[in-house]
């Protein structure tokens, strides 16, 4: 009988330990929250999973009334089928950032297209990409047009190809991180640094002048501080765990 009680006691203790372990794990991985470690490191939550507080439309005074929605803890861009800014338009974080580490998770519909722009200055009558770099988001495998390597996910769009190309298939979550520090920029995708470059150098000038961005002087001379922008390119895209820390 004593041995049975000991076994029962051990079983109960093991069950309690497992419950505590699972509960802690769930707490640390809850979407759209900051862990104690992240809080200590200075991370800020940019999307709370239920509202669009802190966001507004690019070149708009408020958040778009159509084209974007909060859905099941995600910030979703709704497919319009009309291409770039086909519905609600791009959205930006109201606050500007200079040196920072930014991260989020995204998934996209089949053949979808989007992007994350940073150091964005609002240019009246012009899209955000005329004056800001873009980390590409894309289902390149099913995209209907022919693509160059520097147009695939994780790339500095149309300039620096992401290598390795480690994007996950459409419908699966990808993790990205963008680091900007005194002009040095890194793109991270699914745990690997896939692209890096240095702004405001002769190499940067040469690269821009040999690209389509040479037609946009604001791009070559972009600001050292600006908004972070999520692109509406007419595709269904979902975002969550949007966070930043200033460096």
Image: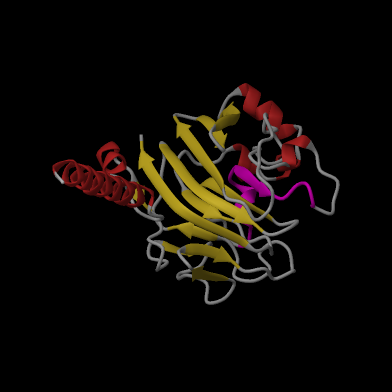
Q: Residue at x 47, y 44 (%)?
A: 103
Judge from the rendering whether residue 54 lies leftward or rightward of residue 65; answer left or right: left
Q: Residue at x 50, y 69 (%)?
A: 71
**Residue 117: percent from the left, percent from the top?**
56, 48
Q: Which residue is at the far bottom?
A: 65
Tell me where residue 219 sits by quadrant: top right
The image shows a total of numbered marks equal to: 0
**Residue 216: percent from the left, percent from the top?**
68, 45
Q: Residue at x 74, y 69 (%)?
A: 81
Q: Say if the magenta span includes residue 129.
A: yes
Q: Which residue is at the far top?
A: 202
Judge from the rendering whether residue 100 lies leftward or rightward of residue 134; answer left or right: left
Q: Residue at x 13, y 43 (%)?
A: 2
Q: Nearer the viewer, residue 118 or 234?
A: 234
Tell me where residue 87 sits by quadrant: bottom right
**Residue 56: percent from the left, percent from the top?**
46, 65
Q: Say if the magenta span includes residue 226.
A: no
Judge from the rendering whether residue 153 lies leftward or rightward of residue 54; answer left or right: right
Q: What is the quadrant of the C terminus in the image? A: top left
Q: Which span of residues is magenta-colored? A: 125-142
Tell me where residue 35 sits by quadrant: top left
């Amino acid at each position: 009988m004593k041995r049975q009680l000991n076994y029962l006691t051990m079983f109960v203790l093991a069950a309690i330990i497992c419950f505590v372990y699972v509960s802690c794990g769930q707490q640390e991985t809850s979407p759209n929250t900051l862990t104690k470690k992240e809080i200590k490191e200075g991370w800020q939550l940019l999307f709370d999973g239920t509202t669009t507080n802190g966001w507004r439309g690019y070149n708009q005074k408020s958040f778009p009334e159509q084209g974007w929605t909060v859905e099941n803890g995600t910030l979703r861009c709704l497919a319009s089928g009309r291409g770039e800014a086909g519905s609600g338009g791009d959205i930006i974080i109201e606050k500007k950032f200079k040196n920072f580490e930014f991260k989020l998770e995204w998934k996209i519909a089949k053949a979808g297209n989007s992007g994350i722009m940073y150091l964005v200055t609002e240019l009246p009558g012009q899209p955000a990409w005329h004056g800001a770099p873009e980390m590409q988001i894309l289902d390149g495998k099913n995209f209907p047009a022919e693509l160059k390597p520097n147009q695939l996910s994780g790339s500095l769009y149309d300039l620096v190809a992401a290598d390795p190309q480690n994007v996950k298939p459409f419908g699966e979550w990808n993790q990205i991180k963008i680091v900007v520090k005194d002009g040095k920029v890194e793109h991270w995708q699914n745990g690997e640094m896939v692209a890096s470059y240095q702004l405001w150098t002769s190499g940067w000038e040469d690269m821009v002048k040999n690209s389509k961005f040479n037609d946009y002087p604001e791009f070559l001379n972009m600001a050292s501080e600006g908004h972070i922008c999520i692109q509406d390119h007419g595709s269904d895209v979902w975002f969550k765990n949007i966070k930043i820390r200033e460096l």
